[in-house]
Image: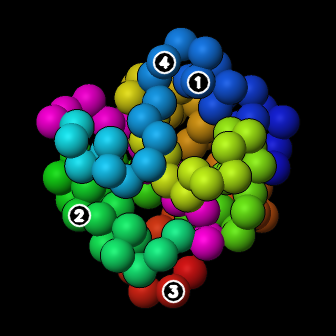
Amino acid sequence: MNNKIETYIGFSIRSGKIIFGVEMLERQKKGVYLLIADGAIGKNSLKSMVNAQAKFGCPFLMTDEGVLSATVHRPAVKAVAITDQNLAKAILSVADGEPQIKFYSGGNN
């Protein structure tokens, strides 16, 4: 993955502006600006992420299998949400040029 994206996600972790996992995301009421899911996410979790995208009206990125887990250095994490608007914009600005990341458009990516 792009070093800039790794850096921005690292900033999110250090500043506490990230939510790990679908269960924690479902508890969130507002303030989510970007959703990112690993390609290895399960079907039910993916449905929850799609519902969260509709709920928060934010972009949804899918990474190749194992990329997100490696980036956040937590092998069990398959979904994260960025809760800082500026960090979300920064990640989106460099995500277009990254071949391992795609915008989720429904169905199989």
Query: Do tag 1 and tag 2 residues touch (Cβ < 8 Å)?
Result: no
Q: What residue lies at 29% left-to-right and 65% top-to-bottom?
A: 48
Of mark 1 and mark 2, the one earlier in the sequence is: 1
Of mark 2 and mark 3, the one earlier in the sequence is: 2
Within-10-Å neighbours for mark 4: few <14, some 14–19, many 20+: few
Q: What residue lies at 32% left-to-right and 36% top-to-bottom?
A: 32
Q: Which residue is mark 1?
A: 13
Q: Amino acid at mark 4?
A: Gly
17 up-or-down from 41: above or below = above
Q: Find residue 94 and report its horizontal and vertical position in percent.
A: 69, 42
Q: CA distance from mark 2 to mark 4?
A: 23 Å
- Residue 83 lies left or right of residue 109; in this view the side is left
Q: Which residues are magenta?
A: 29-40
Within-10-Å neighbours for mark 2: few <14, some 14–19, many 20+: few
- Give the label, 1 or 2, closer to the camera: 1
Rendered image: mark on residue 51: 2
Q: What residue lies at 45% left-to-right and 22% top-to-bottom?
A: 17
Q: Does residue 68 show up magenta in the picture?
A: no
Of mark 1 and mark 3, the one earlier in the sequence is: 1
